[in-house]
Image (spheres, helix red, strand yellow):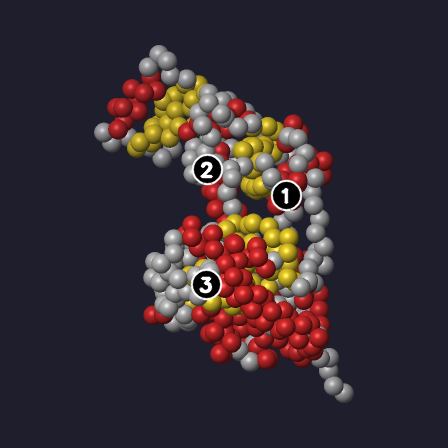
Amino acid sequence: MPGPPSPAADAERVEARIRARLEPEPELLARLAEVRADLVRAVGQAARERKSPLSRALIAGSAARGTFLKDRLDVDLFMLFPPTLSREELSHHGLGLAEAVLTAPERRYADHPYLRGSFQGFTVDAVPGYAVTDPSHPLSPVDRTPFHDEYLKAHETAAMVADVRVAKQFLRGLGVYGSEARTQGFSGYLVELLVLQFGGFHALVESARTWRIPARIRPAAEDPPRLPEEVALILADPVDPHRNVASALSRRNLALFVLAADAYLADPSENWFRAPASHVLTRADALVRVAERGTAVVVVELPRPSLVDDTLYPQIRKAQRTLAEEVGRAGFTVLGSASGAGVKGVLVALEVASGTLPAVRLQDGPPVGLDRVGSFLEKWTHSGARVLQGPYVDEDGRLAVETRRPEREIVPTIQELLPRLSLGKNLTPGVHTLPPVRPLADQPDSPELDHALTELFGKHLPWRRR
């Protein structure tokens, strides 16, 4: 009598069903092909009418290769101009052409402005760039895109295209799909290269379950130069070996994928390819949790600078990291930190074991016999020293003294620290404009507060909530 099916057989059946579910209908693919051709023709016509120095227009990205997810289908239009144009001229000509062909265009910003609008019922991102001949020497971040498109089209098979969609949906279910600074996840291009490298989705997760961070996909001799210490995944761009394709990916998100790959292969099901239900924690919810945990939460509110997300979010993370480190140095036990950004404000929330410190603070001194003993004794025996006990020699033969803390409460401690802290180029407050610092109970409700509190108290493995 045959035994129960193996996890490998279950995974094969699950992945086949997911491939079928994600397969675009032939009518959609045919319509998309027509729209791509019409859009390129429309841009060319607009360029001739406006005497624009357009070198060429093309559709690249997932809509060009069929690797899109049906409910996240955007058409990426790239308008390439001679490298002799300045950035201002590039934006002027590129945005002018986009406005001529798109319906209801909206200006957006990344490294430089682009337009999002509609064309024949499809959402289009129209991005200007330079028509460079060497992708290892781009003049703007999008200049490599045509080379990426050509490389993938030359190497991907229909089976790999189908598995790219499966991989994207798996990562989406984990919340780690997207290379934006807000997400710090897997870019679409990185996903396609990984599927191509391993030959399919299943082989990718089989390999990923064994990865250690930092993960190296190819031999170390092929590493791009100048990798940062905190790099998570190393994969040289095949069209520009000096660039790490995975530079935006955080260690946390890679670790989540590695853990999920192992858990999925042990218990495969279609649930892995569904996004978990989101649950937003409000201030009222968080106050209940804080009471249960016996901790304290304080919120620092900073004005939001006029920056695009990819510039803003690294600064927010620096502010969050700096505040947590400095509050820890002040003697508080920091249990967690989180942040949120809204239209007008940026919040950093810190959870500490207690919002009040003991009056006494232990100050360690040098071992007896060192030259510094004299200066330590001089510092802590003068008449103005805030000494509660000592100086004395401890069990390890070092001098020590117990002093009175100048500030014991978390809120005034942070208020006193803020003028000395660097929170990011555009987030550091001026000396005369110190931001509000409040206990959670006094912080006004806002979407950005809900986001920070959900991050602070909603930690879980995504697949455990399904």
On screen, residue 430 above or below 461: above
Task: Check disc 2 and report its element: helix, strand or loop.
Answer: loop
Residue labelled with disc 1: 451
Whether residue 112 is visible here, answered yes or no, is yes
In depth, the one of 147 and 370 nearer the eye is 147
Q: Given the image, on which type of amino acid does mark 1 rest? A: His
Q: Quadrant of residue 338?
A: top right
On screen, residue 41 above or below 113: below
Numbered circle sitting on residue 54: 3
Residue drawn 37% across the image and 13% down it:
384
Numbered circle sitting on residue 108: none
Q: Position of residue 223 (x, y in %)?
A: 37, 66
Task: State which tag comes first along the sequence, 2 or 1.
Answer: 2
Q: Position of residue 204 (x, y in %)?
A: 54, 72
In depth, the one of 68 and 142 nearer the eye is 142
Numbered circle sitting on residue 426: 2
In this view, the mark in front (2 or 1): 2
10 Å crowding of disc 1: few (<14), some (14-19), many (20+): many
Task: Check disc 1 and report its element: helix, strand or loop.
Answer: helix
